[in-house]
Amino acid sequence: MPVEILMPALSPTMEEGTLAKWHVKEGDAVASGDVIAEIETDKATMEFEAVDEGMMGKILVAEGTASVAVNTPIAVLLEEGESPNDIDSAAPTPEPAAMGEAANELSAAAQAAGAPEQINQKAPPAPESADGGRVFASPLARRIAEQKGLELSQITGTGPRGRIVKADVEAADPAKQATPTAASAPKASAAPSPAAPSAKAAADPGKIASVYADREYQEIALDGMRRTIAARLTEAKQDIPHFYLRRDIHLDALLKFRGELNAQLKERGVKLSVNDFIIKACAAALQQVPTANAIWAGDRILQLKPSDVAVAVAIEGGLFTPVLKDAHAKSLSALSAEMKDLASRARDRKLAPHEYQGGSFAISNLGMFGIENFDAVINPPHGAILAVGAGVKKPVVHENGALGVATVMSVTMSVDHRVIDGALGAKLLAAIKDGLENPLALLA
């Protein structure tokens, strides 16, 4: 039967995507694993591979179509012996869907199920497992199971995310399948209760725009990245109990040491930045204060052993936070090279999801823009984020009581109080300060 290819959830935060490019056209043969399209998510442009084999029967979403909700049909794949006439001509071409609670539900379903295929509207509904959940199987596996009289709900799938494939059905023994009983029959789901009005409904965009009806303005549509940033940071400020710790760090010793190292590394084409030292100092501090190397996981705290440090990278229209994994175990030159590579690919939106997911701690450095101090918003599920300001020459009182001038950098650490208490956060920030003011120890 014809198989609908759905817009997949290619990242945990993806709710809609842009179909940037088709690599196949109607009538082309498609094999499992073939790259059939490029999809622009909220974070990057990624290749989309076919799961089943067949012929591309109909393309439902044209190249360049934006805001296509996850789980929306984008094409129809025909199996062997089928023709375009088998496609339900009455099926409407999907339109770009608006964001909202429905899109969130589709995204969650797609992530949990690995964006499986849906059959044509004329086909019977997919079988359900004993607990009422949908059973995901390839079209060939469904056909073989029907021929052998097998219940798909009683077959364990070995495909991606538990999907039932041909080999699973062929290996199943009809004699060993239990007859469904009333106790194991899917339970009827309760009728959903009416949803309470959302904050989005309360803030009517039309009403807001009407206030400025007599003013000249340009309306800028939100892309996937800006929507995601808005949603995640709003959630972070609403749900995470932030508190803030501030310290001044004297940079003169670090700047001198950095100059000496760069002179020695010049022939190797290596140039260390102050940010490289900050990354290394934070990674080392997380090892020195291991109980602060933790994240909030809903109903528990996960304490990490490696120092996986995320660094905010500004790009046009948003930002990425690529993660330098095992940063404590890497040299300054290795961290510098990796950071340059990640930042470059972030600006081109070429990062893979595993490169910007994870980590327990983040760094946001606006010092290069002349900002002396600021408070950063925690990027969940991180336990803390360090906001780094510019190094500025300031009058200081030295330990011996003498007045002098020093290069001072102000930092503010935003902390999730569910994970890190005040004294523990102060201990972590003190370790970061010590590492930056005594940079030679970072090489030990």
Image (cartoon, rainbow, N blue to C red):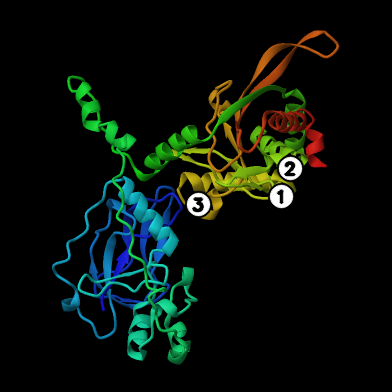
Q: Amino acid at mark 3?
A: Leu
Give how far across and how far down residue 325 sits, in percent: 64, 50
Residue 427: image quadrant is top right
Q: Quadrant of the N terminus?
A: bottom left
Q: CA distance from mark 1 to mark 3?
A: 25 Å
What residue is pinned by disc 1? 305
Tag count: 3
Q: CA distance from mark 2 to mark 3?
A: 29 Å
Q: Amino acid at mark 2?
A: Pro
Give how far across and how far down residue 374 sits, in percent: 55, 23
Callout in the foreground (1, 3): 1
What residue is pinned by disc 2? 290
What residue is pinned by disc 3? 351
In the shown orientation, is residue 142 left or right of residue 281? Answer: left
Bin the neighbour count of mark 3 within 10 Å (Cα to Cα): few under 14, some 14-19, many 20 and up: many
Bin the neighbour count of mark 1 within 10 Å (Cα to Cα): few under 14, some 14-19, many 20 and up: few
Give how far across and how far down residue 242 sits, in percent: 56, 30
Callout in the foreground (2, 3): 2
Question: In the structure shown, which secondary structural element does the residue marked by tag 1 occupy?
Answer: loop
Residue 345 in sight here: yes
Residue 317: image quadrant is top left
